[in-house]
Amino acid sequence: MKKMPPIQKILEAYTAIVDKHVELKNNEALVTSSNGAKTYTVSWDNDIYHSNDNATYWQGYAGYPIIAVLMLQGKIPFDQKLADNFASVNWNEVNAKFKRNYAKAASEVIKKKGLDEKEVMVELERVYGALKDLPITIKRGSLRPPKASK
């Protein structure tokens, strides 16, 4: 990957997975946002991943929908026990509250969940390292624009 996402996007991927917001198909996944307002499409062909989520499309790095798909595909580590702590987090709301300062947003959620931030960061670093070493290419866009969820 040429551009890495903020490490905190891993927590958003955890929420998407534990809240069952990721529907894997053949070479495509539909990922519903944490507030249920949008559904993003992640598609892949071998090691090239596309997504129409805002982070991937506008910032050019793997957004949480791609990270969640990579976890479900077994390409990067997924800690179910830790992920369970991030069920039902409305990341859209939290990130807006902290004006897209993902580190502050994540820190707030970790504290509210009563977790040890240093322990959480150790696991995030492990996942981030695996993501960094993954020989994949991230492409902006998708075959479909994001659609409003019902």
Image (cartoon, grey):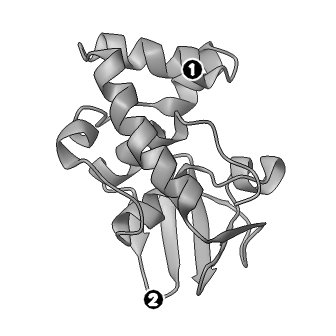
- Give the x, y percent position of residue 38: 58, 52
What residue lies at 71% left-to-right and 47% top-to-bottom?
Answer: 55
Residue 125 visible within the image: yes
**Which disc is residue 26 wearing?**
2
Task: Say few, some or many: other residues with alpha carbon within 10 Å of mark 2 (under 14 / 14 to 19 / 20 or more).
Answer: few
First in sequence, mark 2 or 1: give its number: 2
Nearest the viewer among 117 and 145 is 117
Q: Nearer the viewer, residue 103 or 126?
A: 126
> Where does residue 137 sit, x and y in percent of width and height?
70, 70
**x, y (%) of residue 11?**
43, 37
Q: CA distance from mark 2 to mark 1?
A: 34 Å
Residue at the extreme right of the image, as rendered: 58
What quarter of the picture does the N terminus occupy?
bottom right
Three-letter amino acid code at disc 1?
Ala
Exactly how many numbered labels are in the figure? 2
Left or right for 81, reference 42: left
Image location of residue 94, percent across then percent down: 53, 21
Which is more toward the observer, 74 or 102?
74
- From this view, report whether residue 93 is shown above or below residue 98: below
Task: Tell me which residue sits at (39%, 18%) in the image.
Answer: 109
Q: In the rendered image, which quarter is residue 51 located in?
A: bottom right
Horizontal placement of 5 versus 73: left or right? right
Q: Which residue is mark 1?
A: 103
Which residue is rendered at x = 40% and y = 75% of the image? 24
Horizontal side, residue 108 vs residue 54: left or right:
left
Q: Secondary structure under badge 1?
A: helix
- Give, as a three-letter code, the residue at label 2: Asn
- Describe the element under mark 2 as helix, strand or loop: loop
